[in-house]
Amino acid sequence: MESARLLKIILVLTLCLGLEAKEYTRCQLTRELLKNNLFPRTFLSNWVCLIEQTSDRNTSAFVEKSLRRKYYGLFQIGSEWCKEGKKGGKCDITCESLLDEDIKDDAQCAQRVFDLEGFKYWPKWEVRCKGQQLPDIEKCPDWVYIPSRASPPRDKRTLRGRRELRRARRHLKMNLLI
């Protein structure tokens, strides 16, 4: 009970000090996730779906299931990954930092959770995103397709082609000097 009261006090202080929470639109969220460049584009729709289902795109989302089971922020990261009041947990961050507007540390921690446990860590992803229609984030204005990497010109692909290219350049220089 005491830790719940302490957490509420910390949350109020956090909001009063200007570390405000933010509720994103789908496209704003996509832009932020792309900006942080932590998630591969192929999985970005899964991450957006996860965030929409767990926190409704609200950075201040907080769920307390029991004194020891608390979940924080956009990704609803559990209290074993952070520590209240000071850095700690498996992500070595404060739980309060998962509730502010800066989502870079949240995304890094979520990526760490994913690396160790996959999407199965989040039961709502399993039920509401896995095998379901994912959010269409490609309609967002910041979504840009990266052009495919074209093959280099044939003369630059082989050692023989590069030698011939160097010879031709030397021959051209010699002719310009004469």
Image (spheres, helix red, strand yellow):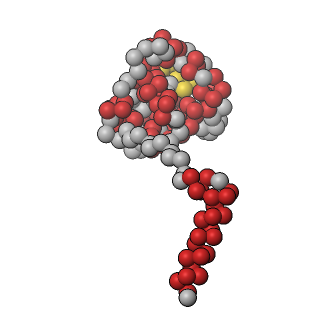
Say if 62 sits above or below 173 in the image.
above
Say if 35 sits above or below 9 in the image.
below
Residue at left offset 40%, top offset 35%:
30
Can you tell which quarter of the image residue 109 is in?
top right
Can you tell which quarter of the image residue 136 is in?
top left
Count of numbered badges drawn on the protein: 0
Q: Is residue 7 left or right of residue 55?
A: right
Q: Is residue 129 left or right of residue 85?
A: left
Say if 64 sits above or below 42 in the image.
above
Residue at left offset 59%, top offset 56%:
156
User: In the orientation shown, which residue stands out farthest toward the right?
Assistant: 159
Residue 100 or residue 177, whichever sits in front? 177
The C terminus - image quarter: bottom right
Residue 150 or residue 18, whichever sits in front? 150
Residue at left offset 44%, top offset 42%:
146
The answer to whether residue 138 shows anywhere in this view is yes
Residue at left offset 41%, top offset 21%:
134
The N terminus - image quarter: top right
The answer to whether residue 96 shows anywhere in this view is no
